[in-house]
Image: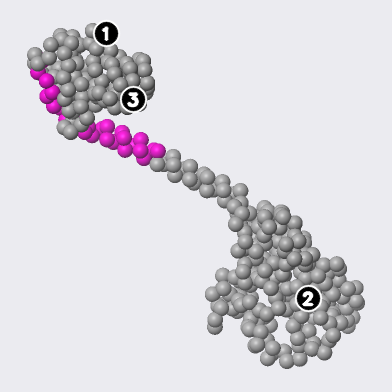
Amino acid sequence: MIQLDYVDREKSTQTIPVVCMHCDSPTCAEVCPADAIKKTEDGIVQTARKPRCIACNNCVLACPFGVPKMSTSASLMMKCDMCYDRTSVGLKPMCASVCPSQALAFGTREEMAKLRPNAKAVNTFQFGGQMIKTKVNLMVPKATMQELVDVTAAMHVPTIGHNVLDDIFDGGGEG
Amino acid sequence: MTSGISSEPGTPSQTVPPDRASRENQPRWRKDFPIDWAEADYVSRRDLIKYVVLTSGAFAVGQAYIVWKTLQAKAQSLYPRSLIAGLEELPVGGAKTFTYPEGSTPRLLVRTGPEEFVAYDQQCTHLQCPVVPKVSEGKIHCPCHNGWFDLKTGAPTAGPPRRPLPRVLLDVQGQAVYAVGVESKTL
């Protein structure tokens, strides 16, 4: 069972990294009318090519993971590309290298396996009729029988999480 | 630390079509607009326009440079003033060949009147045959293909030549004829 939690942007300062999943069949690139989104040989889906991007927002609306962001000032879609300029020369991505508590970490598969001995990696996601395999993996408990994450089905399961309230003078939430 | 990006097992880096069918069974537009960078050799319209504008700009600059260089060369004359004939050397209607400047193709000097001289390149502008002056008719004749030029101006009047004969500019002073320049026209 996969539980989804939602960030209450209005009340919470909680943030979530929107990391590109680098799909084997990138929906953003599939819907791009300008042929601007390309995937390099190492499987990294890149930010839209500046000479081609027409800032139509199709990719922003289409991506099931909500990764592409439109930079209106630059008329260019920019997305997480694993900080390709850094990772392609052996540096860590910016988000992982600046995170003070290492909530975001960047390492090899072996290092991750050592950190999460009871978890296995799943990289298949189901969005209704659309099945997507991604280069980025999700760590799920080893015991689970699930081989894929049915995201849209999980959306209808009521959350069991608590309300995260940052206003400590508010008297706390219900749970 | 070595390169952070590596091909991981089980995740193909090549793009898979959404229907997960084989690449051969895909519509043709997928081959024209591939998502994989390595296969994308399509030149975008903006790239093409940039290329065309910059290339034609470079051509325009090159043309401007050629014009500038020609004007520069004209300004500093390559042609010295040199004596080519005495006034009494030629009778009226007579002609002689000379070279000007030194080492040029043969030029033709014609005395058309007591004080009037004209000089042209001796090569026909059609296929470089030597031309023959016909002073009584006021023409220059090329016997090879029956080409005719006007004796006064060097302009082609009949036959295959289309360009005027290059004209040698003359200066008659006292008893001598001097060449002072060459005027080549293309039309």
Point out the frontmost of discs 2 and 3.
Answer: 3
Residue at the (16%, 19%) spot, across then down = B96
What residue is shown with label 2? A124
Residue stretch rendered in magenta on the structure = B63-87
Horizontally, residue B152 falls left or right of residue A67, namely left
How far from the left and from the top, in percent, is residue B52? Answer: 52, 45
Q: Is residue B76 magenta?
A: yes
How far apart, in angstroms, are the residues tagged by discs 1 and 2? 98 Å
Identify the amino acid type marked 2: Thr
**Which chain does tag 1 point to?**
B
Label 1 element class: helix
Q: Quadrant of the C terminus of chain B?
A: top left
Task: Decide: is B128 above or below A145.
Answer: above
Residue type beneath disc 1: Glu
Q: Which residue is mark 3?
A: B126
- The residue identified by callout 1 is B137
Callouts 1 and 2 in the same chain: no
Whole-percent x, y for residue A105 in the image: 65, 82
Identify the image quadrant of the N terminus of chain B.
Answer: bottom right
What residue is shown at x 27% (from left), y 32% (from top)? B74
Name the N-terminal-most of marks 3 and 1: 3
Distance, label 2 to label 3, CA atoms, is: 79 Å
Query: Label 3 is found on which chain of the structure?
Result: B
Secondary element at tag 2? strand
Callout 1 crowding tier (Cα within 10 Å): few <14, some 14–19, many ≥20: few
Labels 3 and 1 in the same subunit = yes
Magenta-drawn stretch contains A124: no
Dot 2: within a 10 Å radius of its alpha carbon, few (fewer than 14), some, or many (20 or more) residues?
some
Q: Nearer the viewer, mark 1 or mark 2?
A: 1
Residue A27 visible, this orientation = no
Q: Residue at (20%, 21%) from the top-left corner?
A: B108
Q: Residue at x 15, y 10 (%)?
A: B92
